[in-house]
Image: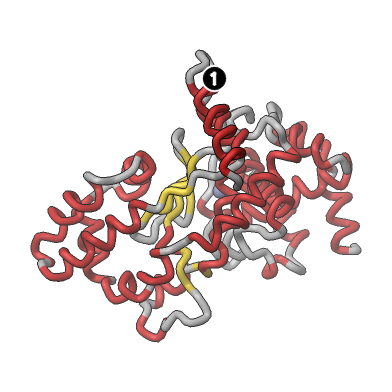
């Protein structure tokens, strides 16, 4: 960026920041430079070295050198996911080889700036009202690869750390099952960016609501980045069976049987169902900008499902 352009953006940022009634997020969207905050990762590893040398005081050490120095994002992630300093310290110490093995790969994430920036711009083009929060890269204990708070997108970077050169031989089997590839980071950021922009959608508590909330994040993430957060290859051939089951469950307040793998269906079936409904809706409307606007302002989920004509879409896509 040229110096003059940078100065102009700074001036614009200052003017807007001090105008009453304007949201700071607007500044981010105008400068289109995603704010990527990685300070928590360096704090984590400073604490990690100290805690390894003195595991009896790990909780105190993580508290002082990681949590107390933490960003707003880490504070939110602690409240919604980590919740216990004691359990966090225990977990990290017992899987210290894992945290050590990913250290280099998560300590510098500059290589993703360009693609995250490109994805944000693609979203803004399709949905001009989009809000662009800061992205906080954090270290947790394998509870979440991504979530959002009022302050931003929160990424559990330790989950997204596998690379082709990772030595996974000594990785715990359960961690390995949940771990995702490092190059998946931009897609997770896109999925969470959509969640951050779902505040105009009606709240709900049914399976249908939850599936559309998750599935629309997947559908829009794919539109802007070319990929979905979850892998849906395992659903091929099961589409009709899952759709039949879904119709029986759609008004129930349940989620985990549609998230966990079971004899009935693969993991993330709820995501897949919502994603498929959004794709079906897109197939009906065809205008991408209109579809995004419609999805991100849904007030009646039953009506949306009906308009999607998902059964017709399944007929075409599975050639039944
Ligand atoms: Zn999600």
Residue farthest along the bottom direction in this orientation = 169
**Residue at x-position 82% and y-position 48%:** 280
**Residue at x-position 56% and y-position 67%:** 183
Name the one closer to the observer, 145 or 69. Answer: 69
Name the one closer to the observer, 268 or 30. Answer: 30
The correct choice, above or below, for 246 with respect to 31 in the image is: below
Left or right: 241, with 20 as reference point: right
Check disc 1 and report the residue beneath it. 22
Q: Quadrant of residue 33?
A: top right
The image shows residue 238 at horizontal and vertical percentages of: 73, 65
- Residue 252 visible? The answer is no
**Could you tell me which secondary element the residue under label 1 belongs to?**
loop
The image shows residue 204 at horizontal and vertical percentages of: 58, 32
The image shows residue 243 at horizontal and vertical percentages of: 73, 53
Left or right: 107, with 127 as reference point: left
- Would the CB of label 1 be found within 8 Å of ligand 1? no
- Residue 217 visible? The answer is yes
**Residue at x-position 50% and y-position 25%:** 14
């Amino acid at each position: 960026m040229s110096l003059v352009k940078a100065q102009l953006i700074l001036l614009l940022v200052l003017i807007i920041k001090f105008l009453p009634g304007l949201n700071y997020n607007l500044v981010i969207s105008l400068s289109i430079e995603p704010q990527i905050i990685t300070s928590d990762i360096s704090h984590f590893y400073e604490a990690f070295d100290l805690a390894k040398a003195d595991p009896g005081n790990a909780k105190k050490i993580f508290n002082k050198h990681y949590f107390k120095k933490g960003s707003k994002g880490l504070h939110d992630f602690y409240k919604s996911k980590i919740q216990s300093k004691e359990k966090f310290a225990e977990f990290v110490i017992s899987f210290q080889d894992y945290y050590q093995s990913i250290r280099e790969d998560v300590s510098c994430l500059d290589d993703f700036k360009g693609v995250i920036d490109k994805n944000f711009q693609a979203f803004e083009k399709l949905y001009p009202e989009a809000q662009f929060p800061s992205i906080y890269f954090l270290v947790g204990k394998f509870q979440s690869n991504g979530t959002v708070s009022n302050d931003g997108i929160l990424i559990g970077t330790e989950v997204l750390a596998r690379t082709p050169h990772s030595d996974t031989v000594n990785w715990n089997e359960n961690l390995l099952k949940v771990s995702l590839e490092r190059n998946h980071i931009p897609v997770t950021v896109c999925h969470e960016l959509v969640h951050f922009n779902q505040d105009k959608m009606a709240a709900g508590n049914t399976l249908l609501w939850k599936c559309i909330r998750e599935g629309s994040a997947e559908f829009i993430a794919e539109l802007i980045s070319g990929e979905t957060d979850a892998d849906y290859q395992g659903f091929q051939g099961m589409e009709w069976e899952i759709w039949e089951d879904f119709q029986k469950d759609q008004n129930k307040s349940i989620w985990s049987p549609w998230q966990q793998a079971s004899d009935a269906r693969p993991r993330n079936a709820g995501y897949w169902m919502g994603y498929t409904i959004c794709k079906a809706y897109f197939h009906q409307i065809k205008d991408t900008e209109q579809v995004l606007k419609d999805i991100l302002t849904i007030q009646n989920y039953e009506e949306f499902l009906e308009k999607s004509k998902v059964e017709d879409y399944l007929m075409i896509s599975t050639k039944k």
